[in-house]
Structures are given as structure tokens and as C-alpha cells.
Amino acid sequence: MSRVLSIKDMHKTYAGGVHAVRGVSFDVKEGESVAIIGSSGSGKSTVLRCINRLIEPTEGEVRLRGDLINTPNTDINDVRSRIGMVFQSFELFAHLRVIDNVTLGLRYVKGMSKKEAEREALEVLEKVDMLDRKDAFPGNLSGGQKQRVAIARALAMKPEVMLFDEPTSALDPELIGSVLKTIRGLADDGMTMVVVTHEISFARDVADRVIYMDQGIIAETGASSIIESPKTERLKRFLSSITEDD
Amino acid sequence: MVETTGPEKNYGSQFGISKLCAVIILAIFVISLPASAQEYRSGWDIVEGGTSSDLFSVQAQDDEIWAFGENGTIIMSTDGGLNWQNYESSISSNLSISDSGFGAFIAAGTDGTVIIKSDSTSPWREISVEVGDGFISGISLTGNSTAVAVGNNGNIWTYDVQTWSNISVGEGDLLDVSFLDSDKGIAVGELGTILFSDDGGGSWDYRDAPTEASNSRIIDVEFFSDIRAYAITDNGEVLKSSRELTTAVGFLWNMQYFESEGGSSNLGVELTSIEIATTNKFLLSGADGYLSMSKDGGNIVNRQIIPVGNSTSFNDIAMIDGFNGVAVGSSGSLLLTERSGEDEQIGFEVMDFSEFGNFVDYSKGMLIDGLFATMNIVIFGIFLGFFLGISLSMMKTSPTTLKEIAQKRSPALIRIFGIVFLVIGIVLLRHLMPIFENLGLDGWEYIYAPIGIINPDGITGDLQFENFLFLILGVSLSLLGMLLISGDGTYKKSTYALGGREINWNPWGVRPLNFIATIYTDIFRNTPLIVQFLFIHFGVQIGALIGDPGAEMLEGSNGLITSFLRDDILSNRACVSAIFALGLNSGAYQCETIRGAISAIPSGQMEAGRSIGLNYMQTMRLIIMPQAIRICIPPMGNEMVNLVLNSSLAMVIGYSELTRKAKLINAVTFQVFWSYGMVLISYFIVTWTLALFLRYLENKTRIPGLGISGGN
Ligand SMILES: Nc1ncnc2c1ncn2[C@@H]1O[C@H](COP(=O)(O)OP(=O)(O)OP(=O)(O)O)[C@@H](O)[C@H]1O
Ligand SMILES: [Mg+2]
């Protein structure tokens, strides 16, 4: 299988001097779903945001289908339109109706006509089961619905890989299920994805591979079975702390 | 009343109340009509000149007034025109033209007879010129014993050192000449000829008459001052030349259009002469008893009542000062005025301003005019301000730093840019050096240098805004150039130890667009608006700079909006200045308001926009701005109310908006409390309506989840 994403020796030092990511390397293959887990502050979001360059990695290489994308000459807007991103806090455009949230990128990045874009948008909204609320304003949706619209917005661009940054952390427990179900559906359809999550059960059941990050490095990685039988002491401690929380 | 209501009772049952009401309303209407028409009497008085010969020309200077006429008639007055005596001369020609100045008087006849009186003590002396078959038709002094005369076939004669010399400048007949001083003079003639000399008449250049007058006979010209000259044609047109910005008077000539003639440039009378009372007021004389005066800077010319019959032909007017003057005409007619010839109102029922109702009747029209004038500058000011505010706020929030710009290019290229910038910067600064040195400034006085370099030659010189631009560009390009040359490819901040403390110096973090916008907002927010008004109107003269070319561009278009723009906005220089002062100032404040709203939009929105592939500007336009604008409607409302209130400052540049109207009303009625009180109410109504509208707009554009109700 071909590599969609390939990250090599990524470092990120923030302006304040925090060395949040210290040499992270991993590949994501076509159709693979990778879960990144780890305690708060371990650098998971930083890695994800470095991939589509919402922040600039200080060092290292990010390749999308083999092309280096963290150079000053990269057409970053094109790259971003090929990488879908879903945020913890949804970040829907509050002034636009659900359907317009989804068509925005299609019309202004892909240059589709309004009609064309709407047809595509209805398709993805159907997929995330939000068709009936297509004319609502985001402010009138529940958290779970918002997140599914956000997923639809990213999906509409037909990305080659989807990045999820804790898509369920801001949701009430009873709303988490619908979002996870949507993501699981995508994974089953063969969408390539990287999911940062605190939902250990989700990582175990859905992910092909799990990456455990601690203090800016990958402390352990392997098939999702490592959650059942962690090799390192650190992951073991992390998993038990999480189950205690639950 | 009794008669009207009487028969009505017959229909009472049918028409009853409604008819009664109609009658009452009609009665009130009739009663409220002005009691009587206003009556006027002439502003001219007849004086006895002691001659029945036709008088052709008159001159006033210091305490002397001389009038010249048929067969060498000369009469003079030394008491402001009340009493006249005959001056016995040996001249028998008709003295049809004359001039005064430099303490001297001069008069001439078409046959070449010329007499001169060099000062108040010397006698008249004959200095006639040989004109052969030709004639002279205009004469002007260029000193107390030098003169220039013009005549047939483009002939110009100059009198100097007791002798006449003659040149010819063309074919057509010249009809009049007028010198402002011993150098600058204007000559006019047939076929719209206008000539200009600035060497005392030695050489002449052609100037263009306005197209409407290109075939007219220009018969009289008055070079009044450094800022104004007028000329007339015999078929009733007035031409005007003003100093335009830095173009001297006499270069550009325009037709004077008359509102009193429905916007035409033709008065429809045969004119004989023009006399200028003040820069913006002239008097005209003509055949068939025509005497008129201008109002409103020449826009209105009204024929004035004369105390003699219309068979008198008036030939010339001489003003002693702005108000007192003499007019001369056929059969020895001599009229004197103390009020620049303006009709005097008599038998006029003076309004009783001690009654509020009367006062409101009198002033409401003016206040409503003022309100419209205010609305004009407010609406255009808001648009200009909003446009500037949006642009500046986007510039201010633009995140692109020099570092990011530099990183996209190779270090070598950046160095080359640095060298180019430094060279350009130094060249610009070197260009300014001599200008700086010529300013004659010392030490701290250099803080005024930016003003000095824009206008190094004062009121007579050009405004050289490019110098200011060069200064800014020179300094910033030099600094930028040095920075780029010093760049090492990493573009990191530098840290220095100063007195044991660590100083961070990060020029690479400078955001260029933000920098420019900050200079703009700082200038406008740190200077008083009233001074901005004065500077923009009188200093920069933006009305002439932008309004006039704008009006010219729209010349000839008849659209409702374009003709409104042309006639009511662009042609009114004070209006254009007021719009710019308000708009530029408001732009600086609106920028801060919008910027505040932009930063209130969570940073995740920008990231979300960028993450689907929109570029920075698209994200701003499609996502950030639409939300920011909604958030800042309430503070923008304040900004707009402020703009309405600030518009009252436009009175200092003579724009007739609401507040200035109140001042004018006071000048007539002295009802200070009432007039300013009514203005307060007018402003309140406007701003309050505006506030209501904005509240409506806020509700209309409210979106769930945005604004007061919190984030999403
Ligand atoms: N913009 C920033 N500036 C400076 N430091 C930052 C910034 N963003 C994150 N950090 C720091 O970088 C480290 C890694 O942060 P990151 O957000 O990647 O962690 P995370 O693994 O996503 O944590 P969480 O599970 O809480 O989301 C943390 O120590 C954080 O304080
Ligand atoms: Mg995170």
C-alpha cells in the first residue's frame, strides 16, 4: 500500500521556548486509520497541526504522497484542501447555514458553481446524517450535530487524508456516540485518517494502528492490540490512569 | 367669511363638517400668507454733474473721481461724487476710455488722443499716439507715467519714457486691456481673444477663452487682484479667472453661470462694462438703463432699480470702495450709490421675531437646507470612513511578517533586494537634502520639516506631496534595505545586553501592512478633527484637487445621481473637503473598532478557513469579516453618531450645514436660545433615527450563536 502521509523527525519549538515535539516520525498508508493517544500536553495536537501547517514545524519533513510539503514554496492552500481537518471545538462558521458551511470550500477553493457545490454538499450531509438540518444555523445545533457538520465540511473537499483533533472531547457523553459512529463509518469506507483521541475504546476498536505519545516523542506504537497488552511501562501507566478516570 | 359660510348652510346636511374644515383650512392658509409684497427702491441716487454731454468712462482713486465724455468733456469730484466741477480741456475728441492707478489717471479717445495726469498735483498732459486709419479701444496704466493701449488689428502701443512704440500680435481687433501692476496685464478682443503679459506689455501670450465665448467680442476686462480677474462680452456673458491651486490668475478662464438665468451663462442684455467691488462681487452696466450687481459669488446677477428712465445707456461704473461707487451714462447721467447699487427694501413688513411661531416660520427652511447639507457630508463621510476602516483594519490584522516574506525567497535574492532598496532610499533622501537645507530650520525646528518640504515656497508655490512620500519612502526603504542586507537566512531576533538587562530587537517581526496602517491611524487619532478640517480644506485644498476634476469628468451627464454628484457634491469645494475630513478621520476610528471585532473572532475560525484551503484574504472576506461586522454594529453605531455630531465642525470651513445655518439665523434674528435649541433638536432627531436604524440592523443581522449569546 502506498504511503499517504510520511512524517520524518518532526520537531516543534513554540515561540515561548516550549519544545513540544521532539523528533516524531511515522507513516500513514492508504486507507489506514491511525489513532494518536497520550496524556495532555504530550504534543498530539502540535503534530497534527504541523501536518497541514496551521503551525510550522521547526524541523523535519512532512510528505503528502511523497511530496515534501513543508517548504516555503509549497502551494499551501492546495495542500490544505487535500487534507481534511476536524477540530475539537468544531469551528463552524456561525454566520453561514449548515449547507453553506459545507459548500464554502467547494465554491471558493475548488471553483464549483453554487449548484454543483450544493449537490456535493447534500451528498456528504447525507453521509453524516445531517441532511434534515441543512438550513439551520450552527448556533441552533447540538454539539454532536455541529461536529458532524464539521466532518461533512472537511469530507466535501474529498481529502486524501482526514485529521481529527479530539473530535469528541468537547461533547457531552451522550452525544459522543453519534460522532464516533460517523468516524467509524468513514474508516470502514476506507478513508485514510489520523485521529487524536482520548477515547481508548475507540482507538482499540477502530484504529489499525495506535501511536502513544509522551513528552513530545512517540513512546510506543503498534497495532491496536498494544492497548490490551502495552509493552512500555509508560503506556501501561497511562492506560490505567485513564481507566481509573472512567 | 360670513358670505362664504352663509350659503353653505344649505348643503349643511350633505357636506357638513368636511366642507367646513376645508373652508377653515383655506382661511388659515390665506391668513398665513405674507401680508404684503415687499417693496424696493433704487440703491442709486441721481447727482448733478453739470453737463449734458454723454459720459463714457469714470475712474475713482484716492479722493478723486474723474469722468470723461463726448467732445473732450471732463468732470471731477473730490467729495466722493456728491459735487462735481467741469475741467476745461483743450481736447475735442470723445474720451471713451480711461484708467487709473499708481496715483495717476489716463483717458483716451479712439482716434489716438491720450491725456495723462501723473499725480494729484500735476495737470493733464496730452500724449496722443498716431494710429493712422486704426483706433485704440482700451488703455491701462502700468506706472504713473507709463501705459499700454490696444486697438485694431492686434495693435498694442506701449508708452514709456515719453514715447510710444507699437507692436502687433495678430489679426483681430483688441478691445480692452487691464494691468494688475506694472508687469502683469490682460488684453482682450474679438473672437474670444485673451492675451496675457507679465513683462509690462512687451510680449503677450494667448490664453484660451472658454468654448462658449470663443467667438464672442470680449469688450472689457478687469484684472482685479492676484486671485481674480473678470471680463465681459458685449452680448451679456461674464468670464472669470481665478487662481487655481498654484496656477496663477489669468491662465484658466471659465464662464460665469447664473442661477438667476436658470443656469445659463448669458444675461441676455447688451453689456458695456464690468466693475469689481470685491473679489466675489461685481457690478455690470449696459444699454437701456441696465445696472446690475452680483450676489453669491456671481451665481446670481439681478438687475437693480434705477432712479432714471430706461432710455439712459450706462457706459461705466467706478467703485470708490466695496460699497460706494459712481455710474455714468448718456446725456450726462451720473448716479451714486452707497450700497454697491443694491436695491433697498422699503415698505417691508418686518417679521416679529419675538414670537416663536414667526421665528420658526422664518428659520425652518434654512434649518432643513442645513440638515440636507449635513446629511450629504455625513452619508458620503460614512461610506468613505467605512471603506477606509475595513481596509485599514485588514491591514492592521494582517499576520505576514518580514520574516515570512523573506523566508519564501533565497537569502541571496533578499540581499539583492536590500541593496536595491537601500540605493533607492538613499537616492530619495539625497534628492530631499537641498530642499531640507533651503528650509532654513535649526535644531528642534526640524519637527516641522514635513510640512516645509511639501510646500517649500509658501502660498505662491506648488504643493509637493511627492516630497513627503519621498521622505517616508526614503527613510523606510533605507532602513528596510539595511535590514535585508544584514539578513543571514534565519531572520531571528537579536538580543542585546544593555545595562545588565536583556533587550530583544526583532525587526523581522515587523508586519509591513500593519506598520503602514498604524502610521495612518496614529496621525488621524492624535490630531484634532477641527484642525484636520482646516488643513484639508485650506491647506490641501482637496476640493480643487479632487472635486473639480471629478465634476469635470461628469460634465454633460444628465443622470439623476451623476448630476447630483456633480452639482451638489463635487462642485462644492467645502462639501468635498468636509466629506474627506470626516471620512479620513472616521476611517481611523472605524479601523480600531473593526479591528477589535476581528480579534474577538476566535482564532479557530481562521484556522478552520485555512484548513479547507481558503487563502488568507478569502478567509478574511468570507469568514472573519462577515462575523466581525455583525459584532461591531453597536460600536460602529456609536462611530456613526459621532460622525454626525462631528459634521458640525464643517462650519469652520464655511460649509453651510446645520450648525452654520443656526449662526446665520442668529445674525438676522438674534434669537440665540431658539436657534441653537432648534439645531439641537434637529441633530437629536437625526442621530436618534440612526440609532434606531442600527438597532434594527443589529436584530436583522443577528445570528444564533454569534455575539451576545456566546460562542458556539
Ligand atoms: N501556541 C502555543 N504556544 C506555546 N506553547 C504551546 C502552544 N500550543 C501548545 N503549546 C505547548 O506545547 C505542548 C504540547 O501541546 P499540545 O496542544 O500539542 O498537547 P496535546 O497533546 O494536544 O494536549 P491535549 O490533550 O491537552 O490537547 C504543551 O506543553 C503546550 O503547553
Ligand atoms: Mg490537543
Image (cartoon, rainbow, N blue to C red):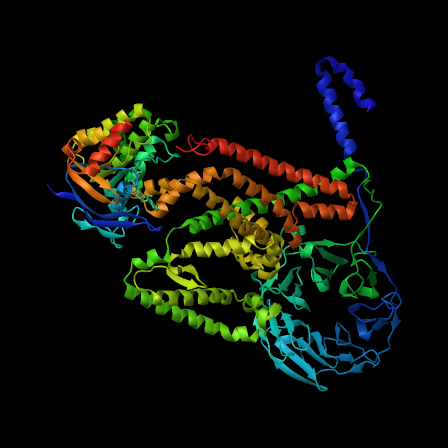
- Choose between B252 and B170: the one closer to the eye: B252
Give the percent coordinates (x, y) of residue B605: 36, 40
Quick check: B566 above or below B504?
A: above
Give the percent coordinates (x, y) of residue B50: 88, 68
Occupied quadrant, residue A164: top left
Figure quadrant, ligand 1? top left
Which quadrant of the figure contains the C terminus of chain B? top left
Occupied quadrant, residue B43: bottom right
Q: Is residue B431 left or right of residue A229?
A: right
Q: Is residue B163 left or right of residue B327?
A: left
> Could you tell me which residue is drawn at 78 percent across and 55 percent down?
B342
Q: Is residue A23 left or right of residue B641?
A: left
> Could you tell me which residue is drawn at 46 percent across and 50 percent down?
B392
> Could you tell me which residue is drawn at 79 percent across and 45 percent down?
B670
**Number of dots carrying numbers:** 0
- Choose between A170 and B663: the one closer to the eye: A170
Give the percent coordinates (x, y) of residue A173: 31, 25
Q: Residue furthest top?
A: B13
Give the percent coordinates (x, y) of residue B384: 51, 48
Res B418 visible: yes
- Choose between A234 and A128: the one closer to the eye: A234
Q: Is residue A203 left or right of residue A134?
A: left
> Could you tell me which residue is drawn at 80 percent across and 82 percent down?
B125
